[in-house]
Image: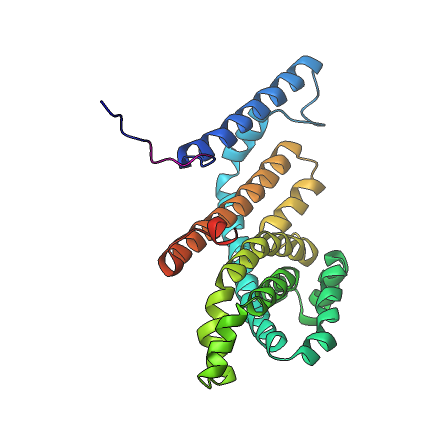
């Protein structure tokens, strides 16, 4: 009698396992945190335990919800700006080596300038508003889009390029029908990396705008000034969850797009 063979390939993990393992690690971390605070009798004023943080989270959950919505909107706006701008810049870089050599170092320079130096300049120039926060998020998330998309546009099969030249395809036709589809996995990877940077940029922008405005950055500033450590930890925890959720959502969306277009996942496409 023959037994049916499992369809799971060696080295692959089921989605339930990929979710379960991080949850187990998180549970162990929370347990160790609680035991450490209880054993050494650390004051909640200095280092609150997970129970105190959870209580504070529930206490200010309405305030946190509005702050998350504001920060997420600013981050999404900044990420959208960086995706459009970065893709257009990558198009220009892929079409001319002279343009790439002339302007690519400035893209690298943009990444090396500390965001703590960029944010005050943007806010002083454009004012303490939503636009300034979104622009800070866009600047911080722009570089991965440029580099990833440029790499994808340039890494095209030479035989396919020769085929397009043989059929007298124009530069625009080659870009839209060959380079762009080939660069799609790279663009999605760049967006995944930039999503976290956009969240950080929005929080930093809100922090510099001031505590009187809504958003997680302003809320962190207020809780830090009042030395309310439990609520400060709760706010930081929610900010971390927001970044993780955005990254996971973009990853899932990217996987769905690639499976529809290429019949494979992002990780399989990169092999």
In reply to whether residue 124 is colored magenta, the answer given is no
| Residue 214 appears in the picture as rendered | no
Q: Residue furthest front?
A: 1
Is residue 149 toward the left or the right of residue 224 in the image? left
**Which residue is rendered at x = 59% and y = 51% of the image?**
196
Residue 212 at x, y percent in the picture: 63, 54
Residue 169 against residue 211 in the figure, above or below:
below
Is residue 78 toward the left or the right of residue 112 in the image? left
- The region drawn magenta spans 6-10
Residue 97 at x, y percent in the picture: 67, 77
Quadrant position of the N terminus in the picture: top left
Q: Nearer the viewer, residue 203 or 232?
A: 203
Residue 211 at x, y percent in the picture: 65, 52
Q: Nearer the viewer, residue 68 or 255?
A: 255
Q: Nearer the viewer, residue 221 or 252?
A: 252
**Which residue is rendered at x = 65% and y = 64% of the image?**
139
Residue 70 against residue 219 in the figure, above or below:
below
Is residue 112 toward the left or the right of residue 263 in the image? right
Question: How many marks do you count on the picture?
Answer: 0
Residue 137 against residue 236 in the figure, above or below:
below
Residue 54 against residue 128 in the figure, above or below:
above
**Which residue is rendered at x = 46% and y = 35% of the image?**
18
Is residue 14 toward the left or the right of residue 110 in the image? left
């Amino acid at each position: 009698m023959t037994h049916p063979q499992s369809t799971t390939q060696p080295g692959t993990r089921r989605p339930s396992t990929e979710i379960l393992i991080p949850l187990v690690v998180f549970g162990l971390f929370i347990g160790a945190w609680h035991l450490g605070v209880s054993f050494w009798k650390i004051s909640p004023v200095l280092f609150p335990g997970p129970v105190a943080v959870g209580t504070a989270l529930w206490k200010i959950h309405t305030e946190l919800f509005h702050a998350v919505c504001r920060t997420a909107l600013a981050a999404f706006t900044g990420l959208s700006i960086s995706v459009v701008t970065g893709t257009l810049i990558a198009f220009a870089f892929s079409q001319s080596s002279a343009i790439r050599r002339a302007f690519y170092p400035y893209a690298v320079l943009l990444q090396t300038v500390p965001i703590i130096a960029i944010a005050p300049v943007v806010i002083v120039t454009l004012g303490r508003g939503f636009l300034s926060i979104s622009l800070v998020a866009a600047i911080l998330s722009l570089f991965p889009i440029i580099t990833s998309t440029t790499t994808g546009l340039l890494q095209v099969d030479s035989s396919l390029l020769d085929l397009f030249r043989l059929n007298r395809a124009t530069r625009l036709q080659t870009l839209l029908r060959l380079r762009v589809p080939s660069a799609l996995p790279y663009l999605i990877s760049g967006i995944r990396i930039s999503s976290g940077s956009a969240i950080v940029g929005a929080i930093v922008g809100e922090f510099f705008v001031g505590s009187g405005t809504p958003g997680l950055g302003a809320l962190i500033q207020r809780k830090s000034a009042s030395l309310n450590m439990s609520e400060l930890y709760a706010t930081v925890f929610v900010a971390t969850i927001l970044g993780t959720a955005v990254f996971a959502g973009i990853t899932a969306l990217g996987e769905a797009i690639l499976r529809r277009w290429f019949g494979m996942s992002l990780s399989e496409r990169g092999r």
